[in-house]
Amino acid sequence: MTAVAATKRYGSGDTAVDRVDATIPAGRFTAVMGPSGSGKSTLVHCLAGLDTLTSGEVWLGDVELGALSDRALTRLRRERIGFVFQAFNLIPTLTAYENIVLPLQLARRQPDGPWLSEVVDVVGLGDRLAHRPSELSGGQQQRVAVARALASRPDVIVADEPTGNLDSTSGSAVLGFLREAVDRFGQTTVMVTHDAVAASYADAVLFLADGRIVDELSGPTPDAVLDRMKRLGS
Ligand SMILES: Nc1ncnc2c1ncn2[C@@H]1O[C@H](COP(=O)(O)OP(=O)(O)OP(=O)(O)O)[C@@H](O)[C@H]1O
């Protein structure tokens, strides 16, 4: 997934993302950090086809998202991208299992049984599959959301503050599962976070300030991430 001179201006004239060139490397876990309002969510939402650029390009493989009709973009999101948001966004009337396979059903695809068992195993939900979201803890609900994102074997998982609503124990479990999906399945993953510890689960961190990528760190430790963030003045 690659952004080329990606620029997003809002009606008010604010430039949220300013000529960003960035590649989210395949099979790796990339974190995006930066001060509040630096454009993290806007950039990642444009990468994932949830929002459209004002100018520039986003490529997923050999497809340029800006060239797609709304319908084709919806299909690309459904078939090639897995989403995990801060709010778990589970359907309350469905069980955990039904939530996990819902995107496959919407895409009229047959669930791949062995793959689903592996995903459920990785996120450690075996005995909770018949529960509804209200019967699960926040951490368990987010694990269902991660399993749902993994179920269709997307090209990319896009996570926006996936641990924002979780205590640190549940948060580290969810981050551990994202990490394991990268290590075991080569799952390309990009995650927006405010948290240096969360970012340290990634292979590399991109730092944004005022809509531009201003720094990059590979093999991040929490201390190294905090140090870079301090230099950005936040
Ligand atoms: N829908 C919108 N309409 C107008 N301006 C917007 C909109 N969404 C974001 N912005 C502006 O774009 C800039 C970048 O916002 P964005 O949410 O991408 O930043 P962020 O780094 O994700 O922030 P945070 O860490 O606080 O979530 C901000 O100045 C914000 O006010």
Image: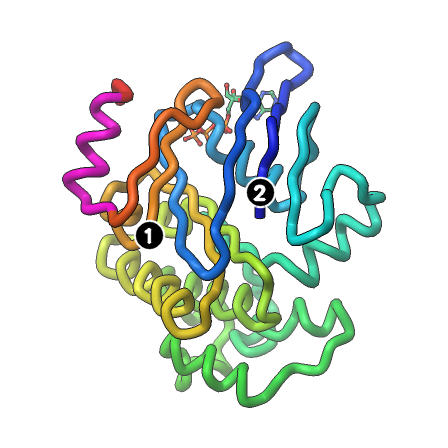
**In the image, what residue type sits under mark 2?**
Thr
Q: Residue at x 52, y 74 (%)?
A: 96
- Span colored in magenta: 220-231
Q: How is the image coloured?
A: rainbow
Find residue 158 and report its horizontal and vertical position in percent: 52, 51
Label 2 SS: strand
Q: Quadrant of residue 17?
A: top right
Q: Which mark is residue 100?
A: none
Q: Residue at x 69, y 63 (%)?
A: 79
Label 1 SS: loop
- Quarter in which the C terminus is drawn: top left
Q: Does 31 appear in magenta?
A: no
- Would you say 108 lies left or right of 29 here? right
Q: Which mark is residue 2?
A: 2
Q: Which mark is residue 202?
A: 1
Q: CA distance from mark 2 to mark 1?
A: 18 Å
Find residue 83 and report its horizontal and vertical position in percent: 55, 55
Q: Nearer the viewer, residue 165 or 93?
A: 165
**In the image, what residue type sits under mark 1?**
Ala
Q: Does 226 appear in magenta?
A: yes
Residue, far top: 13
Residue, far front: 62
Q: Residue at x 51, y 37 (%)?
A: 22
Q: Residue at x 70, y 34 (%)?
A: 52
Does any portion of residue 231 appear in the rendered image?
A: yes
Q: Nearer the viewer, residue 131 or 168?
A: 168
Find residue 127 and report its horizontal and vertical position in percent: 40, 85
Q: Earlier in the sequence, mark 2 or mark 1?
A: 2
Q: Nearer the viewer, residue 35 or 128?
A: 35
Of badges 2 and 1, the one in the foreground is: 2
| Image: 119 above or below 79 | below
